[in-house]
Image: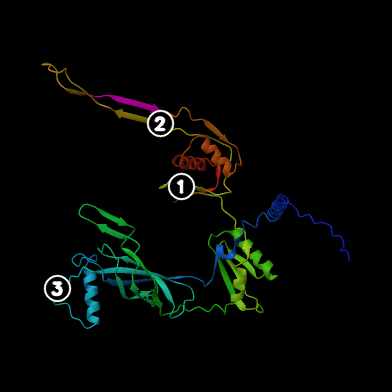
Amino acid sequence: MTRQPHRPHRRWPSPVALLGAALTLAAVLLLAAPGAWAASRIKDIADFEGVRDNLLVGYGLVVGLNGTGDDMDDDPYTRESLIGMLERMGVNTRDGDLSPDNVAAVMVTATLPPFARQGSRIDVTLSALGTASNLLGGTLLVTPLMGADGEIYAVAQGQLQVGGFVAQGEAETVTKGVPTNGRIPAGAIVENEVPFELAGMESVKISLRNPDLTTGRRIANAINTFLGTDLARPLDPGTVLMRVPRDYPGGVVALMTDVEQLRVEPDQLARVVIDEQTGTIVIGENVRIDTVAIAQGNLTIRVTETPQVSQPAPFSTTGDTVVVPRTDIEIDEGEDNRLTVVNPGVTLQDLVNGLNALGVGPRDMISILQAIKAAGALQAEIQVM
């Protein structure tokens, strides 16, 4: 009988040890590449020359509405358009009384994507032009869509999809969404192409969506590092010129495909964006403030009228019933507000904490930021929307 050799028992690490090792590895990876998470692809921060959309617009008629169309007396252009369309089909309606309530004039808009070929389909959006109250159930008749040059690039037709609706009774009306807008998915056929030869280009211009000199230089450096030669250079804050190598595999299309995947960390301008209508404030990361003292307080006067009625005792023959005024006045001078000193070079978090310590709301914070900028202590650009 042969004995089996003795094998030592293997001890596997505990789940706690495995979890600790995984967390340690994740921490090492985060420390090794701190800027990788902030980097963006070039395709997300810039556009390539020639790869662009084109806007189309047209005027058409929607038929088949359930009595919610245009009023022919108030919208004469709808009547004339309907008469002209029927005459082109051999129907003479000028001698009769043409006043349907199931027809509406609409403006049709669409976006022609780059390199769209003949026969491809695009989505269209429709908006009522006259007094129509609802486009639900309507059908758009053949409508040419023109570009800015006046040429026809697509033709639209089809059944509308309307997201809103109107429910009306004798005492109440319920409206959801905007029933005078609709869309037709794949409702237009491309009839004319925008000519542009991409494969034969010897150089490509990259347009930054947020022009910045530092970001443009970083894009050029990333492209040159990828290609191993100096073929890209910034022309201005919004444009980077990239020359196409003659021996690049796949030509300019393959080059643009590879370049748009390169990651670059875009630089941000120190800027404070203020929307005074909604009280929204967006403060950039690089905003800095010099030494400044801030005090915020408002004078509030509240006047409350609570009139009382004074009348004689019951069954009394003397005295009159009169209204006696009672006025209560409250004055708040903001005595609890304090003066806060903001140290030089504070970060965004320090600024927010300092203003929140004063109990400042968004509306008052707008005035404070504008006052700090006027004093020359805010090292950032303020953009009011």
Give the magenta range. 324-332
Q: Is residue 286 above or below residue 122?
A: above
Could you tell me which secondary element the residue under label 1 belongs to? Answer: strand
Which residue position is annotated with label 2? 299
* Amino acid type, residue under disc 3 in the picture: Asp
Residue drawn where x is 65% and y is 67% of the image? 223
- Residue at (19% x, 70% y) in the render: 100
SS for tag 3? loop
On whether residue 315 falls in the magenta region, the answer is no
Q: Residue at x 58, y 72 (%)?
A: 204
Asked whether disc 2 touches disc 1, contact meaning CB atoms under 8 Å apart, the reply is no
- Using a 10 Å C-alpha cutoff, classify the residue at mark 3 as few (fewer than 14 neighbours), some (14 to 19) or many (20 or more): few
Nearest to N terminus: mark 3 or mark 1: 3
- Which residue was labeled with disc 3? 97
Residue flagged by tag 1: what amino acid is it?
Thr
- Label drawn at residue 280: 1
Helix, strand or loop at disc 2?
A: loop
- Disc nearer the start of the sequence (3/2): 3
The reply to whether residue 238 is in sight is no
Residue beneath the point at 63% across and 63% down:
263
Q: Position of residue 162 (x, y in %)?
A: 34, 65
Q: Is residue 331 magenta?
A: yes
Q: Is residue 90 above or below residue 12?
A: below
Left or right: residue 338 compared with residue 187? right
Q: Residue 213: x and y, percent?
A: 59, 59
**Quadrant in the rendering for residue 353:** top right
Main SS type for the magenta part?
Answer: strand
Q: How many marks?
A: 3
Examine the rendered structure and indicate whether residue 91 appears above or below residue 5: below
For the residues carrying marks 3 and 2, which lies nearer the camera in this image? 3
